[in-house]
Image: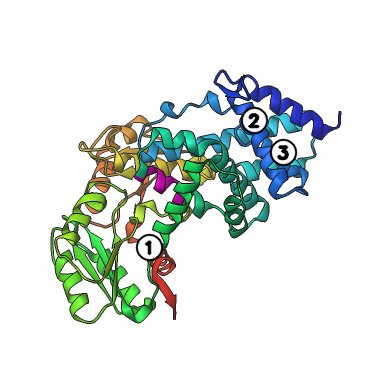
Amino acid sequence: MTPFELAFTRIDAANAEDPNTIIVEGRSRAAELVYSERMSAMLARVAPDAPDALQLAARAQHLRRWTIPRDSYAMDRAGYHRWRGELKRRHAEWATEILSECGIDAETTAKVASLIRKENLKTDFLSQTLEDVACLVFLQHYAADFAAKHDHEKMIGIVQKTWKKMSDEGQQAALALPLDAGVHALVKEALAVARQQARQRVSRHDLAVILAAHGDRGGEDPNASLRRHCSALATEGGYHSVAAGILRGEPSLEDSVLTAIASGAKSIAVYPMFMAEGYFTSKVLVQRLAALEIAIDVHVMPPLGADPRMSALMLAQAIATADASGTEPAAARLLIVGHGSKLGPASADATRAVAAEIAKERRFARVESAFLEEAEFLSDALQRALHTPTVVLGFFSGDGLHAADDVPEAIATTAACAIYAGSIGRSPRVVDLIRSSIDAEFIAGP
């Protein structure tokens, strides 16, 4: 056999070990082996001239997936994303091992790993093609089973998310698939609902921006970073208006919204200056806005901490702090400090997730997380490695009590070998994240 043929055989042999089975044409077969065959068949349908790297990546897309079950991670949104991230990493590693052993050249092997990790989606044609194929396989072979297990509204959302993942070519291919009648009806309805929900794009001078925040407690100058971000957005964004909307302080969220409407704004973007999609973003903000019964479009954006670019921003700040103090990052620990909460997992999950993303870059000897209001507490994390050079970076949106007082106090009290990089929410570069997110959602033109 050629190295390519041998690699296919080895991948299939690994997937054939899946203890989970499905019935195909009256025969019980290993579930992941069937999935890999369906991926290859769909790839041959939409891209018959696919290069070796894409064919191998399609075959190894779910390589040994059953060994990392979903319930090995928290059964919430953050846990799901950590599970998916670990799957992509491990699938790529296992595929790399097999391809190297089969004599596949290093360049092809590296490309296969990159494709499996879904790097450069929307910009890399091969990566996007693989994503299209996975979505098409889901719609044709698995969506009907999903529909039997989930309520109708959830399935509409699942189909809409699947559709957004695909390229225009992938969407056209989906419309041509011989879908189950129920799935075909779901796709038709999901697309109709999406068209109804499509946000009307507006010009900058018609859009009011409100940075919604809890409000700092303590610190030398509460809400100072929030005011700076508002000022920078107002200067650089060209929006109708920019204001803070504070849940516990002034100006209040309601006052800022009503002021924007009274001054002629046609749409309002409410950007939560929070680090997790938790109680305040999913309930408090939504309920307080709904109570105003606003006639114009008011949209609550995902919070600052959920921005996928946050990990890169934090890593850059941590490295800059280490360099300024003469600390070598590769010999130091990076400690990401979050608020944490006794009321729910959102804050801690978001903190651990961003720490995990930073750790993937391997710039620090290790990356850990600690919290102010739940275990592992910051003081305990510092005491556990008192003499290890440590950069402490706050996963906070502002510079109030926690960022300005609690973290420095813990470092001083423990006498740890640690330097404080401050709160990431104070970074001037946060404004770039906010502006680009809002523009992508709302802006039609200059």
Callout 3: SS: helix
Query: Circle 1 is placed at which residue position?
Result: 196
Q: Earlier in the sequence, mark 3 or mark 1?
A: 3
Residue 313 place in picture, x, y as percent: 45, 56
Q: Residue at x 45, y 35 (%)?
A: 146
- Residue type pointed to by label 2: Trp
Check disc 2: other Cα within 10 Å, few if <14, some if 14-19, many if 20+. Answer: some
Secondary structure mostly taken by the magenta-highlighted segment of the chain: helix
Q: Is residue 144 magenta?
A: no
Residue 345 disc label: none
Residue 56 disc label: 3
- Residue type pointed to by label 1: Gln
Residue 94 disc label: 2
CA distance for labels 3 and 2: 12 Å
Callout 1: SS: helix
Residue 70 place in picture, x, y as percent: 45, 29
Residue 214 place in picture, x, y as percent: 20, 56
Check disc 3: other Cα within 10 Å, few if <14, some if 14-19, many if 20+. Answer: many
Q: Which residues are magenta?
A: 153-160
**In the rendered image of this protein, does residue 240 appear above or below residue 377?**
below
CA distance for labels 3 and 1: 39 Å
